[in-house]
Image (cartoon, helix red, strand yellow):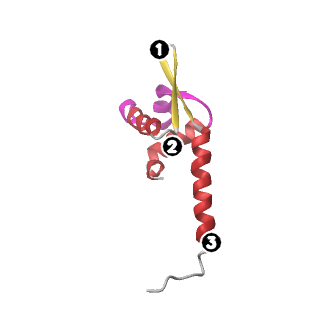
Amino acid sequence: MRLLADPARAAIVDVLAAGPACTCHLVEDLGLTQPNVSNHLRALRHAGLVSAEPHGRYTYYHLNADALDAAAAHLSALAARARAAAGSRREC
């Protein structure tokens, strides 16, 4: 969750949800510098949210939908637990 709390990373994920893009597309679409985009992509790749696919002299990045589904399922389970326990208090 902390990974996507960064506005630039969230914006990159949003752009990639529309389809694969290379770094130059992300720089143009988001108005970020190339090194900034590359650093954020590295963090997203390391977390397994984004994959890289070489295509000629460019690398295209795309979202890993399975990783997003797993994160969404985890958050949904946490929300369900919170709703179920909302009325109970632990004794001190």
Q: Amino acid at mark 2?
A: Ala
Measure how far apart labels 3 and 1 are at the Cα level: 50 Å
Q: Give the residue pinned by disc 3.
A: 83
Which residue is at the far left? 35
- Residue located at (46% from left, 43% from top): 9
Q: Nearer the viewer, mark 1 or mark 2?
A: 1
Q: Nearer the viewer, mark 3 or mark 2?
A: 3
The answer to whether residue 83 is above or below residue 15 is below
- Residue located at (40% from left, 32% from top): 38
**Classed neighbour count for the residue bearing mark 3: other residues with Cα under 10 Å, few (<14), some (14–19), many (≥20):** few
Q: Which mark is residue 82?
A: none
**Classed neighbour count for the residue bearing mark 1: other residues with Cα under 10 Å, few (<14), some (14–19), many (≥20):** few
Q: SS at mark 1? A: loop
Report which quarter residue 85 is drawn in. bottom right
Q: Is residue 81 part of the magenta span, yes or no?
A: no
Q: Amino acid at mark 1?
A: Arg
Q: SS at mark 3? A: helix
Q: Give the residue pinned by disc 2.
A: 11
Image coords of residue 89 (percent x, y) = 53, 83
Q: Which mark is residue 57?
A: 1
Question: From the image, which quarter does the C terminus lie in?
Answer: bottom left
